């Protein structure tokens, strides 16, 4: 493919959805595809090394490092909102957990008018992307030949098994497949890894097809806005990567479609900067209104989360200490020569989905176990050994927004965490259950002492104060370009932006309701399904 500024499809964002979509669309040699990424190539060894996620969470080169506005229900704290800024997007910096959610999540989308997005309709797209190497799992629900490697951890910590045994002491069942239609129980998560390395969507979907002559992948290209001709999207304006002279903006033309895959923060922000959104929001930062679409940037949802952190007398958990130095040296060699051990860990190895009350019809909280002592003070690591247990609300009632108050700079991100008191009360019940699990003998035998919230926090009011002081998210923002049929829907069920032509959004922002679990696998599924819809529309044109 000759160097050109005109393509059939221009995809903005090379993350979980964008990399997947670029692979599938460019499989048709009759079309040309340009994939634009603001960040660098995924060349850092931190990306391929699973334990590198500790550093990537604060690495400005590969991470947008957004932050929320002060959260009223969290004592006015700002909350970090890390998002991948690199080929592979957030799949290059995340915890690698492969989770799809619950059957009822997708059936719920269909009930809201999102035809074709029920569980039975999306299951084939989950299976198409997946190469699961566990022969014990049911082939009705799992793919074996897809691009994305899904596997069990090579060397899970023994703390993971202790966690599962401790939960069993409270009559919490074991779950061997968190990606069956109705997952419930605890166990060790499957991960997106291959041969002990992270398998991001860049590695899975882009690397194998980079030689295609009809696919151009451009890094270091920051898209500023979508160019519109009347209602029709005709291209994008961008800077960087050699586009434009002396840093001035330049443009790329889309003969077919412009497709935003910039995520739940980036996609609504791009629409707003392009004059598409609530007219009042656009006028606030001095923009020109093109399409008055009030739902853009609204409906932001994320999984609100809080930790219980314990130190331990035992050095069995991962940790940094004098007595751990020989082990750490051995683990480094184990990784260098065999890609095994602690450096192959995603650090959120075990967990599960449980009900905080028998009256719940399905699990309402999720646990993520870290077999180490996580920092509650914003540091990457804490000195010593311990166990940390995350608890998050799976289907929060609270809503936030992505808006803009100035033409330049980052968007305003109001996560709206705990704006609805029901989320606080559900999280409180989840934290009480987490503390009970940590006190069961299989874990307690490691000599655990609770640091946060601490043994003196016993009443509901104490725990509510802890939640306000420590709650964050597990980095699953969705919903800001929600699909649907109502007035506030941004995209229709074919992911076309309402009131426009040849413009789609394909990423987690289109979820009308957040899924009950981690969001990377659903974002990939969305792109798989979108690729089919885009191809169908091209054939009909």
Image (cartoon, rainbow, N blue to C red):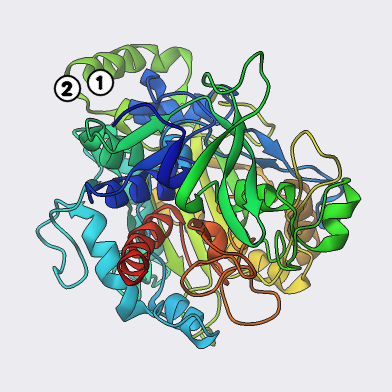
How many other residues sit within 10 Å of disc 1, few (<14), some (14-19) or many (≥20)? some
Residues at marks 2 and 1, CA–CA distance in whole angstroms: 5 Å
**Residue 122 in the image: x percent, y percent?**
33, 72
> Is residue 147 in sight in this rendering?
yes
Residue farthest left in this picture: 135
Which residue is rendered at x = 22% and y = 30% of the image? 211
How many other residues sit within 10 Å of disc 2, few (<14), some (14-19) or many (≥20)? few
Which residue is rendered at x = 33% and y = 59% of the image? 528
Please indicate whether residue 278 sits to the left or right of residue 265 in the image: right
| Residue corresponding to mark 1 | 335
Closer-to-camera residue (520/500): 500
Question: Count of labels shown?
Answer: 2
Rendered image: mark on residue 370: none
CB atoms at circles 2 and 1 under 8 Å apart? yes
**Residue 435 in the image: x percent, y percent?**
56, 57
Rendered image: mark on residue 338: 2
Q: Is residue 429 above or below residue 257?
A: below
Please indicate whether residue 161 sits to the left or right of residue 133 in the image: right
Q: Is residue 431 above or below residue 85?
A: below
Is disc 2 placed on a helix, strand or loop? helix
Which residue is rendered at x = 77% and y = 71% of the image? 421
**Residue 361 in the image: x percent, y percent?**
48, 85
Q: Quadrant of residue 305?
A: bottom right
**Residue 8 in the image: x percent, y percent?**
40, 48
Q: Is residue 59 above or below residue 541?
A: above
Closer-to-camera residue (446/7): 7
Closer-to-camera residue (28/200): 28
Please indicate whether residue 470 sits to the left or right of residue 491 in the image: right
Is disc 1 placed on a helix, strand or loop? helix
Quadrant holding the N terminus = top left
Quadrant holding the C terminus = bottom left
Q: Quadrant of residue 203?
A: top left
């Amino acid at each position: 493919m000759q160097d050109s500024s005109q393509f059939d499809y221009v995809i903005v964002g090379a993350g979980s959805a964008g990399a997947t979509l670029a692979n599938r669309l460019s499989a048709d040699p009759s079309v040309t595809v340009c994939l634009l990424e603001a960040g660098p190539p995924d060349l850092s060894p931190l990306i391929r090394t699973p334990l590198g996620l500790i550093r990537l969470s604060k690495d400005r080169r590969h991470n947008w490092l957004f932050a929320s506005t002060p959260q009223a229900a969290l004592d006015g704290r700002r909350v970090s909102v890390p998002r991948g800024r690199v080929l592979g997007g957030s799949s290059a910096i995340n915890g690698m957990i492969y989770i799809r959610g619950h059957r009822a999540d997708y059936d719920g989308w269909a009930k809201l008018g999102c035809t074709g997005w029920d569980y039975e309709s999306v299951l084939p797209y989950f299976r198409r992307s997946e190469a699961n190497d566990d022969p014990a799992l049911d082939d009705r629900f799992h793919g074996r030949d897809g691009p994305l490697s899904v596997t069990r951890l090579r060397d899970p910590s023994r703390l993971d098994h202790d966690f599962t045994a401790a939960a069993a002491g409270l009559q919490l069942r074991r779950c061997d497949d968190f990606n069956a239609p109705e997952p419930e129980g605890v166990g060790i998560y499957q991960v997106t890894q291959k041969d002990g390395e992270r398998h991001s969507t860049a590695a899975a979907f882009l690397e194998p097809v980079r030689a295609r002559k009809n696919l151009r992948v451009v890094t270091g290209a920051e898209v500023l806005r979508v160019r519109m001709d009347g209602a029709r999207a005709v291209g994008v304006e961008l800077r960087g990567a050699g586009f434009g002279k002396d840093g001035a903006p330049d443009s790329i033309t889309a003969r077919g479609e412009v497709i935003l895959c910039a995520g739940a923060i980036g996609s609504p922000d791009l629409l707003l900067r392009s004059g598409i959104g609530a007219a009042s929001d656009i006028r606030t930062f001095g923009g020109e209104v093109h399409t008055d679409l009030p739902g853009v940037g609204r409906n932001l949802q994320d999984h609100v989360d809080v930790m219980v952190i314990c130190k331990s007398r035992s050095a069995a958990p991962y940790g940094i200490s004098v007595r751990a130095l020989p082990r750490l040296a051995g683990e480094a060699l184990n990784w260098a020569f065999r890609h095994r051990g602690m450096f192959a860990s995603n650090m959120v190895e075990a967990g599960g989905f449980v009900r905080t009350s028998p009256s719940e019809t399905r699990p309402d909280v999720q646990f993520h176990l870290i077999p180490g002592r996580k920092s509650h003070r914003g540091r990457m690591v804490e000195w010593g050994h311990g166990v940390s247990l995350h608890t998050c609300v799976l289907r929060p009632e609270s809503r936030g927004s992505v808006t803009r108050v100035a033409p330049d700079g980052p968007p305003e991100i109001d996560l709206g965490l705990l704006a609805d008191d029901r989320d606080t009360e559900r999280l409180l019940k989840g934290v009480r259950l987490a503390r009970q699990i940590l006190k069961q003998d299989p874990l307690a035998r490691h000599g655990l002492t609770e640091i946060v919230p601490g043994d003196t926090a016993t009443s509901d009011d104490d725990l509510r104060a802890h939640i306000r002081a420590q709650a964050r998210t597990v980095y699953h923002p969705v919903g800001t370009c929600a699909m649907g049929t109502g007035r506030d829907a941004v995209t229709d069920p074919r992911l076309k932006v309402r009131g426009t032509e040849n413009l789609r959004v394909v990423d987690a922002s289109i979820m009308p309701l957040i899924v009950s679990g981690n969001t990377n696998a659903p974002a990939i599924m969305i792109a798989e399904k979108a690729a089919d819809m885009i191809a169908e529309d091209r054939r009909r044109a």
